[in-house]
Image (tube, helix red, strand yellow):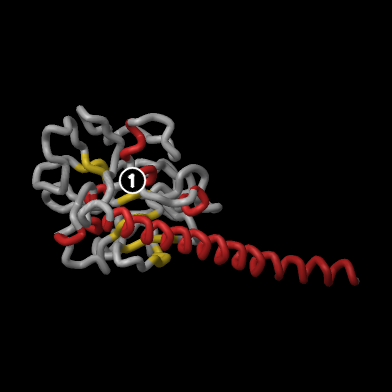
Amino acid sequence: MILVVLLVVGALATPVFLHAREAAGRSRCLSNMRSISTSLQAYAANNSATLPLSMPADAARWYPRREPTVPAVTDVDRAFWANSIEIDAASLSCPAILGFPFNYNGYLHAVSLRTLARPDETIAVWEGSGKRGNPRSLPGLDCSTTDAPCGYFEGTPTITEIPEGSVWTHGRGANFLLLDGHAEWRRLGQTAGVPTNSATDPFHVYDRSGRVDKFWLDDKGQAMLFKLD
């Protein structure tokens, strides 16, 4: 009888324990995001209010499809935002995500903070690659040589490659950091098979496991939730 009671109590306690562990992991990642925000602001303060580059680069060209090493092991990767800001390695991690967890909003590539009207609504960093992180900026700008401007211009191709697996990182959602320093968890994909609200969710349709079909894009091919205008 005692064994039965213990088994029942254990079965009831397991979901509570898992929920508490999930909540703790989410909070830790949100805290790390706030540290990233502080470092981004410090970088901008030391660079004429300009935000860091969204991709690796050298003197000749950009490398938008390169997966940079963090920390950098080559000079090309030192230009990447996560390597150019001053921050400890622990703040660039999230226990719930395998690999580099945070994706930078590529539209912020070398953008001046003075040109942004709504920093409290502008996504800076998010967990866009799901449980298997990827250091590339997402969405990203597909630029070529450095003698041409690379930025959020009409006609600039956007990289919006979706992850192979679920995009859910904490429960049925992911963490987002806004430029004003506010970090929050957002529920993603309310109903399987039904298009989401493009004003609040970056992806179009989710299945029951959190896999997605595509980004929400406007008629110019820009990712709608990440636009700066």
Answer above or below: position of 182 versus 90. below
**Could you tell me residue 132's position as x and y percent?**
47, 44
Answer above or below: position of 142 versus 88. above
Question: What residue do we see at 51% from left, 62% from top?
Answer: 26
The quadrant the N terminus occupies is bottom right
Q: Could you tell whether 118 is left or right of 185 in the image?
A: left
Residue 212 visible to the viewer:
yes
Instruction: Tell me the residue that label 1 is attached to.
Output: 81
Q: Could you tell whether 127 is left or right of 20 in the image?
A: left
**Could you tell me residue 92's position as x and y percent?**
46, 50
Question: What residue do we see at 35% from left, 41% from top?
Answer: 136
Q: What secondary structure is marked by label 1?
A: helix
Question: What residue do we see at 61% from left, 67% from top?
Answer: 20
**Could you tell me residue 151's position as x and y percent?**
16, 45
Residue 203 visible to the viewer:
no
In the image, farthest residue toward the front: 46
The crowding category of the residue bearing disc 1, from other C-alpha atoms within 10 Å (few below 14, some 14 to 19, many at least 20), is many
Question: What residue do we see at 32% from left, 63% from top?
Answer: 178
User: What amino acid is labelled 1 in the image?
Assistant: Trp
Determine which quarter of the picture holds residue 44: bottom left
Label total for image? 1
Q: Could you tell whether 56 is left or right of 143 in the image?
A: right
In the image, farthest residue toward the left: 154
Q: Nearer the viewer, residue 63 or 98?
A: 63
The quadrant the C terminus occupies is bottom left
Determine which quarter of the picture holds residue 179: bottom left
In the image, farthest residue toward the right: 1
**Could you tell me residue 171's position as x and y percent?**
50, 61
Answer above or below: position of 69 versus 203. above
Q: Nearer the viewer, residue 174 or 53?
A: 53
